């Protein structure tokens, strides 16, 4: 059974204080790892896809990296508008997504 | 560009009443369609997925059902709601080969009284 574990569950940062979110996974036949951002009361918004170990993707203050066992979402100099829940998900050879429980990020001004 | 619509945004229903949630996708053909449920503070649980009209696969046994009457329309139903059916229901779509991301609607918040 595929499993995804995200840590920490919650993270409080001061504006400008960089940090990383972790996503560790076990999956049979990894076909991709996705990061999503979810605002309260909204559906997850797609951020990145990573397909192979060593791959990196960037978007504004966010950078996602992938190894064979985990992925990191690095947030550089975060702003209050980066506050959200960040979800990690893996897709297997059967094209099914398994989500982690998410990290709730709060950035204080 | 592709868009996905879910309605209603919020719904309050009594126990034992029926349910119908609708999801439509625009701007793409023959999408894969998915229904998820997200409990408070927890991850997303896949309920149903469909790779084509009339083709439904169920991931979790329950009193919910899904139908796909048209290529870009996905419906989640129940004949008699339970208290445990409360939650945030999300529809999603994807296209193409395996490994492509799923894109989500804004969900329906369902409260059972």
Image: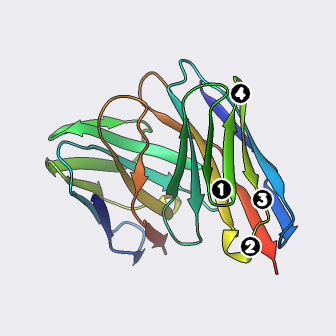
Query: Tag 4: Cα neighbours inside 10 Å, few (<14), some, or many (≥20)?
Result: some
Q: Which residue is mark 2?
A: A79
Q: Is residue B18 visible?
A: no
Same chain letter for marks 1 and 2: yes
**A49 and A38: which one is in front?**
A49
Circle 1: element type: strand
User: Quick one: label 3 or label 1, which is nearer the N terminus?
Assistant: 3
Question: Residue B52's mark?
Answer: none
Q: CA distance from mark 3 to mark 1?
A: 15 Å
Q: Is residue B34 visible?
A: yes
Q: Which residue is mark 4?
A: A67
Foreground disc of the pair 3, 1 = 3
Q: CA distance from mark 4 to mark 1?
A: 18 Å
Circle 3: element type: loop
Q: Which residue is mark 1?
A: A86
User: Quick one: label 4 or label 1, which is nearer the N terminus?
Assistant: 4
User: Quick one: label 1 or label 2, which is nearer the N terminus?
Assistant: 2
User: Quick one: label 2 or label 4, which is nearer the N terminus?
Assistant: 4
Residue A4 sits in quarter: top right
Q: CA distance from mark 2 to mark 4?
A: 27 Å
**Chain for disc number 1:** A
Circle 4: element type: loop
In the figure, is residue A28 to the left or right of B106? right
Q: Which residue is mark 3?
A: A76
């Amino acid at each position: 059974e595929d499993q995804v574990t995200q840590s920490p569950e919650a993270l409080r940062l001061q504006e400008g204080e960089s940090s990383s979110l972790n996503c560790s996974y076990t999956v049979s036949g990894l076909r991709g790892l996705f990061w999503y951002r979810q605002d309260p009361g909204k559906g997850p918004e797609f951020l990145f896809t990573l397909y192979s170990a060593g791959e990196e993707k960037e978007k504004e203050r966010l950078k996602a990296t992938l190894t064979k066992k985990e992925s990191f979402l690095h947030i550089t100099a975060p702003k209050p508008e980066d506050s959200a829940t960040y979800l990690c998900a893996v897709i297997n050879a059967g094209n099914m997504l398994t989500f982690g429980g998410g990290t709730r990020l709060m950035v204080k001004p | 560009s592709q868009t996905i619509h879910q309605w209603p945004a919020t719904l309050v229903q009594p126990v034992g009443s029926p349910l119908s949630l609708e999801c439509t996708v625009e701007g793409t053909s023959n999408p894969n369609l998915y229904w998820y449920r997200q409990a408070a503070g927890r991850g997303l649980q896949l309920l149903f997925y469909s790779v084509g009209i009339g083709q439904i696969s169920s991931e979790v046994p329950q009193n919910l059902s899904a139908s796909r009457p048209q290529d870009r329309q996905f419906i989640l139903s129940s004949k008699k709601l339970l208290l445990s059916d409360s939650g945030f229901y999300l529809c999603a779509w994807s296209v193409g080969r395996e490994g492509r991301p799923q894109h989500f609607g804004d969900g329906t918040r369902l409260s059972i009284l």
